[in-house]
Image: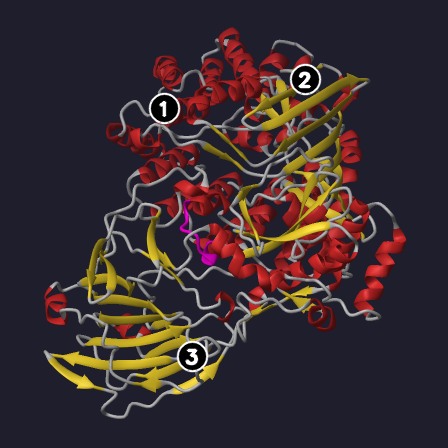
Amino acid sequence: MRAVYLGAVAPLAILAAPAWAGEAVVFADAPEWVVPADFDAAVEEDEEIVLFDRQLRLEDGVVRRFTDIAYAVRNSEILSQLGTLQFGWLPDKGDLAVHRIEIVRDGKVIDLLADGIGHEVIRRETELERRTVNGALTALFKIPGLKVGDILRFSSTTTNRDQALAGAMQATEGLTPKPTRLGYGRLRMSWPQDSGVSYAMLGQAPEPSVSDAKGYRTVELILPIEKLEEMPEDAPARFKVPPALMAGSFATWGDVAAVMAPHYAVENTIEPGSTLAKEVDRIRAATTDPLERAALALRTVQDEINYLLNGMDGGNYLPQSPMETWALGYGDCKAKSVLLLAMLHELDIEAEAMLVNSENGDAVQQWKPLPGAFDHVVVRATIDGTEYWLDGTSAGSRLATIREVPNFGYALPLRASGADLVKLDQRWPGYADRTMRVTYDLSRGVDLPALYDLDVETRGVLAARMEAQASATDPKEVLGHAQKFTDDLFDGFVYEASYSYDPESGIGHLRAKGVLSEAFALDRDTATHKIYTATTNWSFDPDRARAAWRDIPYRVTGPMTSVEEATYRLPDDGKGATISGSGDLAERMVAGTRFERSLTFDDGVVRVTDSASYIPGEIAAADIPATKAAMRAMNSADPEIRISAPRRVWELSDREVAQRVKGLIAPANNLVDLWPDEGNFLMLRSALKTLGRDYPGALVDIDKAIALEGSAAAYTGRADILTRMGRFDDAVAATRTAFELTGDLSDATAYAHALALDGRAEEGLELLDSIDVSGEDRSTVAQIFAEIAGTTDRSDEGWAMLAEALSERPGDDALLNSQCWFVGTWNYHLDDGAELCDRAVKAASYSAAALDSRALVFHRLGREEEALADLDAALKKEPAQAASRYLRGIIRLGRGESEGRTDILEALRLAPDIAARYERYGISPAR
């Protein structure tokens, strides 16, 4: 069931409203009760929406809705949208009368109805994707001769007599606020003074003007209303309900309940001996426990009856009978609820139908009593004094999850004697909606990707969602679903996955294996892995700074319970590892959520078990500051795995690193086998082989990827591999192709660097000369030019470019570092180098790069102790900085220290081309 709630301004070219009586369009004058708008005055306002005038008359059980709209055709886009007018109506409830279709051109009216404009009536169900049919008809009018500069005006009336309301009436019209601009806008509602109809305002709606004349009461508002006060996103729904004018003949919620109740009477609605009766008998025989019987009946309705809303023949409010629903095998929330209600009554279980609002239940308390306040029907069963809320349109409900209370806020019991709204009392779930068990294999080291093995167990709706995936047979489709699921959990990729669903228990499983791209954050000599589980990484920061917001509570959503069991296998059996923060977390309530955590660390394995559970509720505005503080205190103690002085990848021999990466290649093989025509997976495997220093194997894969796609990224990857292999000439060709494909500055500078490394620095400089750049890009080009100019006769030019860039960006740390590096690499103005480099180091706040540049200058000056001090400091900041490690090795070897060989070996593992680069600078290890 859906509430009738129409926006105040219809979309361009569309007028959709309920109606009745026939499938033919009626052409007639506007009803006599309509008060004409001043069209000429509206035109004078010179707005795109010239006129929006909606007037409703509620009388004799019928709601008549008149709409008069005019648009100024200001451009070709509007002209295209208005080329065909569409008028919709529901023939089971009323009819459509078209009064006017006119073009106003240069102040003159072209009456298209008088000219005999044709139309076509079609039936099309626009809500089929939502499994809804309503029998709506649409009248299409193609507008002939419309031009930019014209005004198109059209008006119509629809009527609505709802069969379900027994002569009662209701209407709800949304109110358009500023900044929408209208030449003239108005909303009027009127009804006989003795009809019992009353009105109320919803949300931030202003009070209307009210008048009584000739036996009718009229309420009126001029549109647009004032701009709405913005509300915080995390406010309860009652603070965010859109403004509207409501009117109806229902005085109380009891009136609504009494009118709707007869449609949900289920006595003697199941025919004896029918297949439906046999299904009830089956449930009765299965157990004597009434709660188990209720769970079995709910499962039958959820699993055996497909969802389809049939809004025809009054079906928007009138449910199908239980027998009809069972025979058809489909029904909407009303039909499913009536069927469930009938089954429960046959099983002697106390139950009744309840109207709810599935999206904004908290806001129902703000509504005038109307059926339109609701959009859904469920069943409330009472068993042994406990209320159970049973939703036939939901899925996956079983005995374990039947206690869960949905987030509907308020509900209206449908009783012939009438009833008032009841608040849904929440309770804590007895089972987790999701239990995630994951093992992280971090044993390969802090620099290498990690593996994970995941098992996600779900119940209820979450499990039902997995049922469809469980039926998939294409492994690529399954992997796609699993990847989408894990994207919010991990940075990496899934290489193996399966889904399963047990219809008896209603439990779904996703089992997946994947690769984490980066398991650790690295800072100096410490590796950190943040533990992300059910109780960590929470935030609570409601904004109530505005004066108008200070009394608005925070909305807690739910219900949702998550349990996580995580196991972390650490590198080197946990050597150097500690746990920071708080491992154990005693059960506590913070921000409406229950948290609990336990953590153990033994024999290089960390195990975490925790849970987080929250149910719908509110946090009072006065409690928000203290709740923020409590959440900050809890978050500050989130546990982390910290490893001091871990073994790094450059410390591993080729054999060791190959063995560690071998376990990562197998997952990539799986993806390549599944998608042999996808270059991305070949590039992934190539990257992993590069990590394992299998450069020939990496080159084979990247070449296959290029043969398939030939992207710039693939050529850039090829250039990197070739450079590591010392094939500098081939690397030039690859970088050239990447640059030709993109034309990007980054690819241009990579091409220039490759030319210089291949001994063709002049060509690299000519390439940079050809690039037209400005602003910050000029600074980048200057730095690259200086980097490669030293072996040519253009070194003075390189220095001048840096100086000019610095004149535009005085004190720029990157440019100062480039000058320092230029001095060191090319022995240029060496006498001034130390002072210049001091400035660069200070400007860069003693960064590893600046310290490395100054160390090179100190080395050139023979100040080896100072050079070593800078290199040690640089490597402490950035242990993976190959240049610092290489130069330190050279200096150490020159001093007769054997550790220098280790430094050079490790530098070459990090950057195999570094020896060739330093040979260009005239620097080599002692033989």
Residue 345 in sight from this viewpoint: yes
Assess whether residue 477 is covered by the magenta stretch.
no
Q: CA distance from mark 3 to mark 2?
A: 62 Å
Q: Position of residue 719 (x, y in %)?
A: 58, 46
Q: Position of residue 499 (x, y in %)?
A: 77, 51
Q: Secondary structure at mark 2?
A: strand
* Residue closer to the observer: 76 or 657: 76
- Identified by mark 1, the residue type is Asp
Q: Which residue is mark 3?
A: 138
- Identified by mark 2, the residue type is Ala
Q: Earlier in the sequence, mark 3 or mark 2?
A: 3
Q: CA distance from mark 3 to mark 1?
A: 68 Å
Q: How is the image coloured?
A: secondary structure
Residue 674 in sight from this viewpoint: no
- Identified by mark 3, the residue type is Thr
Give the label on residue 813, or none.
1
Q: Quadrant of the C terminus?
A: top right
Q: Which residues are magenta?
A: 366-373
Give the label on residue 586, or none.
2
- Residue 78, compared with residue 896, is above or below; it is below
